[in-house]
Image (cartoon, grey):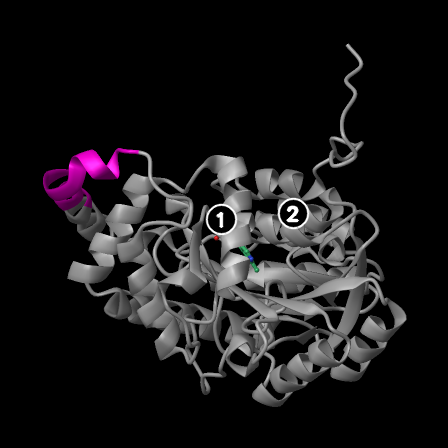
Amino acid sequence: MKYQFSNNVPESDEDPVGNILKVAGDPKIISFAGGLPAPELFPVEDLKKATNEVYDEAGRSALQYSIAAGLPELRKQIAERMKRSGIACDIDNIMITTGSQQSIDLTAKIFVNPGDTVIVEQPTYLCALDVFRSYGAHMVGVPMDDDGMKMDALEQAVKDNPNTKFIYTIPSFQNPTGRTMPAERRQRMIEIAEKYNVMILEDDPYGAIRFAGQDVAPVKTFDQEGRVIYMSTFSKILAPGLRIGWIVAEKSLVKKFTLMKQTVDVHSDNLTQHIIAKYMADYNIDDHIAKIREVYRKREGIMMAAIQKYFPQEAHYSHPEGGLFIWAEVPGVDTQTLFNTCIEHDVAFVPGEPFYADKVIPGTFRLNYSNMKEDQIVTGIKRLGNAIKEAIGS
Ligand code: PMP
């Protein structure tokens, strides 16, 4: 049968990144490829207790249909956390989503008509690119430096594309680069958005996982006009399998999001929302996040020291102060060939190409340090360093 797909569906079934992750998923491989949190940190026992308590205390309502905006108790807890990070909001500014991936999808669904421009960091989170592509967006990448998106280039991109709907940014410990945008750039981004009347989609799954340096307030805290849709998730601070995230936006916008979400999945899993609300009320999520930070701080430190020891001088890399990723650049290296060599030596990373919306910077790749144990990190980076040296003949 020849299926008549909509324009949202990619023509090709190719899934190059899926293939990489599949190869990298072999247990004998030391994989820096995925973006997986450390499973040994999941608070399994506490979540089990919280789940039993939910069944005992509110089993029938937790198993019932609920409202699309999400469980009020959970939204209240999130509003408290958001206020602590400087974002003024109450529960009507918050909608629960089935993970940030859904938040990105709903934003595109609400704002993007085919041909509209979405401005993104260069490079950026590749699954966001897939979403924007599926809605027919014209994507424009803005170059970055160590402090994230360059603001003059951003202004030029917005000026050059009058049909820009929004700027998609991951300002803290960006995926894939690990870079963080300082406060002045965040302020400037708001000024540009106001001047050219565009929205900002602020994706912040990693902001809470800072293990060095000073906190920087979210872009949303500079927003006076309701231009910023802020989104975050429990995936990195609790567990990704729970599939619960949230957006913070202007109340009128939250209503639109709620209507559109209803058409997608009615509401996010009600039982899971109850469990997380219970966990946040009766257990200590801040202590839990502190443990995550500590483990990632250690792993990042070990990976960085190994990179400095084993990578050739020609390599450049980011110095993250939080999050899950280090971004590396080795001019002149074909990263797909390097990947194949590395697999032969049982180590994996993700080549950089799919993270670019348009102009690709070759020789780049992403390394994850959250998911491998300390000794594996050293062994893996040593092997990777040797493979790079072999590839560039140094
Ligand atoms: N945005 C970014 C930048 C991410 O890195 C991820 C997950 N790796 C997501 C969104 C999706 O997160 P979630 O699990 O909440 O859907």
For label 2, count other residues whose C-alpha is less than 10 Å away and answer few (under 14), some (14-19) or many (20+).
some
Q: Is residue 277 above or below residue 227?
A: above
- Looking at the rendering, in which quadrant would you find the N terminus? top right
Q: Which residue is at the far front?
A: 252
* Observer able to see residue 119: no
Residue 165 falls in which quadrant of the image? bottom right
Image coordinates for residue 389, horizontal then vertical, percent? 73, 65
Q: Which residue is at the far top?
A: 1
Question: Residue shown at 37%/68% (left/top)?
Answer: 90
* Observer able to see residue 58: yes
Instruction: List the residue tagged with mark 2.
Output: 109
Question: Residue shown at 83%/72% (left/top)?
Answer: 157
For label 1, count other residues whose C-alpha is less than 10 Å away and answer few (under 14), some (14-19) or many (20+).
many
Judging depth in this view, the residue of 392 and 48 nearest the camera is 48
The magenta segment: 51-64
Instruction: List the residue tagged with mark 1.
Output: 258
Image coordinates for residue 151, horizontal then vertical, percent? 74, 82
Secondary element at tag 1: helix
Q: Is residue 301 above or below residue 152?
A: above
Secondary element at tag 2: helix
Magenta span includes 210: no
Q: Give the side of residue 141 with respect to residue 23, left or right.
A: right
Residue 390 falls in which quadrant of the image? bottom right
